Image (cartoon, rainbow, N blue to C red):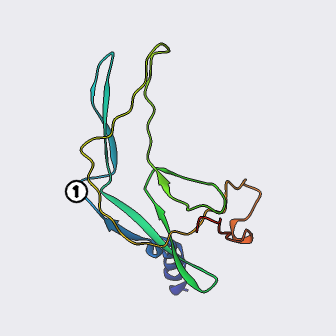
Amino acid sequence: MRCVPIIILLLALTPLLAAETVVVGAGVNAAEVISSTGTETVIQFNLGEYEKNRVEIEGEEWFQVSLRKEGKLLDAGYPELPVMNRSIIIDDQARMQLEVFDLEYVETELPIAPSKGNLTRDIDPATVPFTFDAMY
């Protein structure tokens, strides 16, 4: 009888142990407004870590990558990549321009599993097979 609670606890923790945390930078994942005026907004995105979860598809090793508290791209057949975005208010009459500067990154080779698409709650993800778009 004393083993039952321990077994239940181990089964509950198993999904948490499956994902591996990969540290790629200092600090936490965040998007921070550095400055904002009537004509310019500067936002700094920082990626400190991500989680990767191993998935076997047709005998090959693939990975699902995620960021805590962030969404994912859900286009079926395309790589299921995490998305970190934020909304800002832009005046209706503004002339938009985007500039990316002071970019730092770490390049890594990691086979990314495709998305199964945007599934509704009545569909069991385990019943939907992985498909690979031609871009793979």
For residue 3, side relative to residue 132 (left or right): left
**Residue at (43, 37) in percent of width and height:** 86
Using the image as rendered, state which of residue 135 and residue 123 is in the foreground: 135
Residue 87 lies, with reference to residue 134, above or below; the image says above
Q: Is residue 100 above or below residue 91?
A: below
Q: Give the camera-side residue of 103 and 122.
A: 103
Q: Quadrant of the C terminus?
A: bottom right
Residue at the far right: name it: 122
For this view, does 119 lie left or right of residue 64?
A: right
What is the three-letter code of the residue carrying label 1?
Ala
Q: Position of residue 72 (x, y in %)?
A: 53, 53
Pinpoint residue 14: horizontal percent, then vertical percent. Answer: 50, 76
Element at label 1: loop
Q: What residue does disc 1 label?
A: 26
Q: Quadrant of residue 128?
A: bottom right
Q: Is 60 rendered above or below residue 113?
A: below
Q: How many marks?
A: 1
**Going 74% across and 70% down the picture, which residue do you hit?**
127
Q: Which residue, as the protein is rendered here, is positioned at the far top?
A: 93
- Left or right position of 118 against 95: right
Q: Position of residue 88 (x, y in %)?
A: 43, 28
Quadrant in which residue 17 is drawn? bottom left
Quadrant occupied by the N terminus: bottom right
Residue closest to the eye, 136 or 81: 136
Q: Quadrant of residue 129?
A: bottom right
Give the class, few, some or many, for how many residues have Cα within 10 Å of label 1's Cα (few <14, many ≥20): few
Q: Position of residue 25 (x, y in %)?
A: 25, 59
